[in-house]
Amino acid sequence: MIKKYIFGNPFPTHATVENAEICNHKLPYFKTDENGNFTLNLDENDIVYGLGEQIRGINKRGWKYVSWCSDNPDHHEDTHSLYGAHNFIIVSGKELFGAFFDYPGRLTFDIGYTKINEMSVHAERNNLAVYIITGENEKDITKQFRRLIGRSYIPPMWAFGYGQSRWGYQNEQDIRIVAEKYKEREIPLDSIYLDIDYMERYKDFTVDKNRFPDLEKLTADMKTQGIHLVPIIDAGIKIEEGYDVYEEGVKNNYFCKNENMEDFVGAVWPGRVHFPDFLNSDAREWFGGKYSALTELGIDGFWNDMNEPAIFYTDDRLADTLKKNDSLTSKNMGIDEYFIFTGMVAGLNGNVGDYDKFYHNVDGQMIKHSEVHNLYGMNMTRSAFEALQKIQPEKRTLFFSRASYIGAHRYGGVWQGDNKSWWSHILQSMQQLPALNMAGFLFTGADTGGFGCDTTEDLMLRWLQYSLFTPLFRNHAAAGTREQELYHFSTVEAMGEMIKIRYSLIPYLYSEFLKAALNDEMLFRPLSFDFANDEDSRNIEDQLLLGNELMITPIYKQNANGRYVYLPEEMMLVRMKKHDDFKTEILPKGHHYIPCKLNELIFFIRKDKAIAMCTPVDCTEKIDIGTAKLLGYQGSTYTLYKDDGISHDPKGSLEISVLKTVDI
C-alpha cells in the first residue's frame, strides 16, 4: 500500500508515473516539524536499505548522507554525496516500511550518525512529498515502489557486451588499434567509447576533423567488426561565436539565466560555458534534437557526463579567489594562511554557492537552480531519450548518465561515477547495486579496473570477475593513468577467458534483466531480501543474489587466494577458468572458506536452479541461443526470455522458452 503526504508546495519532479492516495492525516513512523525535519527512532537491530548511489554498506546505518548530485571522484569513507540523488529507503526490523522523500534540493539523511539509534531526514525547504509504502516484505515494498516510478530503461542487447574506453584516445588510429589488438587476442568486444578527445575543442555535437577526419566511415568500419562507437556528451555549451549550438541557445533563450536574466556563465572543459535549461521543455527538445548530428554518422549509443552539473569555477568566484590569494601569497604564509590558500583554490570546483546564482524557466516561472539541483542530470538524459525516439524510432539507443534522480531510470542507465583503481571500490560498487535496483536503475555498473589511479594486474583480473555479472561492463580509465586495455597485461589470456565467460552468460543475464524490468523487480538483491528469517543473511554485505538462480561472491582484497562465504541454503559452487572448463560442488548451508586462484571465477547456483550458457562469440550479434545448455542442478529448468534486442517494446518481440538441464 502506498500513501502520499504533502508538505508545503512541492516542486513537480516527475519522479512518479502513477498516482498514490493522498493522506491528510499525520505522517506515520516519523516525527515532523515545520522546518523540514523528519525523525525516526531506530531499534537496535533495524536495517536501513537504499539511497541508491551512495558510499558505505548495504545497511546505511552509521553515517550522514546528503542527496546533492556532486562531481566527486574521491569516494572515501568520509564522502557524503556522489553523482546521484536517490531518496528511497526501506526500514526493516521492528517496523517494515519504505519511504520516498520526493525533494529535488539538498536533502540530508542522518542515519545513526548524530545519535546512534535515531534517523533524521532534513529538507532545506519544507516543500516536499513523502510516500510511505507498506507491504509483506522488502521485495514487495520495492515492487510497489517500482510500479509507482515506472518501468526501467531497457538498452539494446549489444550494450551487454564488453566495452573498452579511455579518456585519451586521441585520434581515429587509436580506436582502430584498440579494435585490432582485441581481435588479435580473440577477446570479444562490442563497444569502444569516445571521451572528450573526439570533439572539436570540447564542443558538444562536433567532431575534430584533424583527429577524426571521417567519423562516419570509422563508425561503419567498426560495425563490420560488431563494434559500436559510443561518444560522450557533456552538459556545458562552449561560449564561442560561430558555434551553432551556442548561437541557437542564446537566440532562443535555451540557457539557464542569472539573477539579471542574462545567460549564466560557468566553466567546464571548454572553459566558459552556458548550461542548457533542461527543466524547460522547449530547451530539452532543442538539445535532444542535436544528437542527430552524430546519429547521422551511424552512432547508436551515448553517455552523458558532467551533468550534475559540474562547475569548475564561475567568473566572479575565480576573480575573488585570485585577488585574495594574491594577498596571501605576497607574504610568508604560516599554517593558517596556507590552509586558507589551498582551501580557496580547492573550493572553486563545485562550490555550493555557485548553484544559487542561476535559474530555470519552468512554465514561465523562474526557479533557483539550488532548489531543483538534483533534477538537472535526469532531464538531460530525458532530453536525449525522448528526442532519439523520434530520430531513431525503429531501435533502442544506448544511454547512460553520471548524474541522476529517481525517474531518470526510465530514460537511461547510470554508471557508478569516476571511481578509483582501489580494491575497496569493487566492494563499494557491489554494495550500491541493490540500492540502485531499488530505485529503478537496472542498467548500471562500475568502471572496471578503476577510472582514476593506476590499476594493477591482479586488481583488473579480480574486477573483471565481478563486473562480468553487471549489465554495464566497461573498462574505463583516466588520462595520465596506466593503460589498462587487457592486451597490456601478461595475464591477458586469463582476462580474455573472463570476457568469454561473460559472453556465454549474456543470454542468461539479458533474460534476467528483462524479467526484472518487465516485472518491476530487482536484478541484484541482498541475501536478506530472500532469506528474511536467517539472521546471518541480514549481516552479509559482500555477497549478492543475482536473478533467481545465482549468488555472486567477488574477491575484493589484494593477494587473496580465496574468501569466506555464507550459504543461507544448500548451493552449487561453480569454479570456472573457461566457459567450458569448470568444476562444480554441492555445499551445505553454512559458513565456508572457498579457495580461489587468481585466474578462477567462483559463483554459486541456488538449490534446484540452473542457468543458461551459450558458446561465446566475438560480439553479441553472433550469439546463438541454439547453443544454450543449462548448468546447475539436474532435473531443473530455466525460463529463457529473448527478444530481437533492439525494438522499443520488448514485449512485442518477446520469446519465452523453457530449457531443461542436461549434462554440460
Image (cartoon, grey):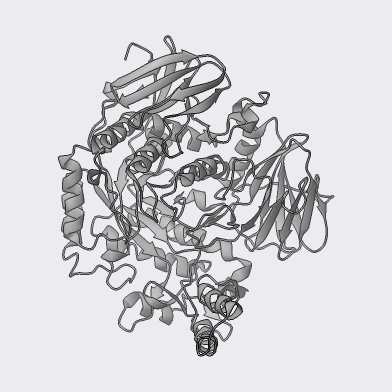
Q: Residue at x 29, y 21 (%)?
A: 581
Residue 622 appears left or right of 514: left
**Which quarter of the picture shows residue 532?**
top right
Q: Position of residue 377 (x, y in %)?
A: 50, 61
Q: Nearer the viewer, residue 241 or 562?
A: 562
Eyeballing the image, is 271 above or below 465? below
Q: Nearer the viewer, residue 389 or 541?
A: 541
Assign the C terminus to one quadrant of the image. top left
As drawn, 341 above or below 437? below
**Residue 27 visible in the picture:** yes
Residue at 47% across / 57% down in the picture?
382
Q: Quadrant of the N terminus?
A: top right
Q: Position of residue 156 (x, y in %)?
A: 35, 43
Residue at 67% x, 26% y is: 535
Q: Is residue 467 above or below residue 663?
A: below
Question: Residue 632 vs residue 591: left or right?
Answer: left
Q: Position of residue 289 (x, y in %)?
A: 37, 64
Task: Residue at the far top: name it.
Answer: 635
Number of on-image labels: 0
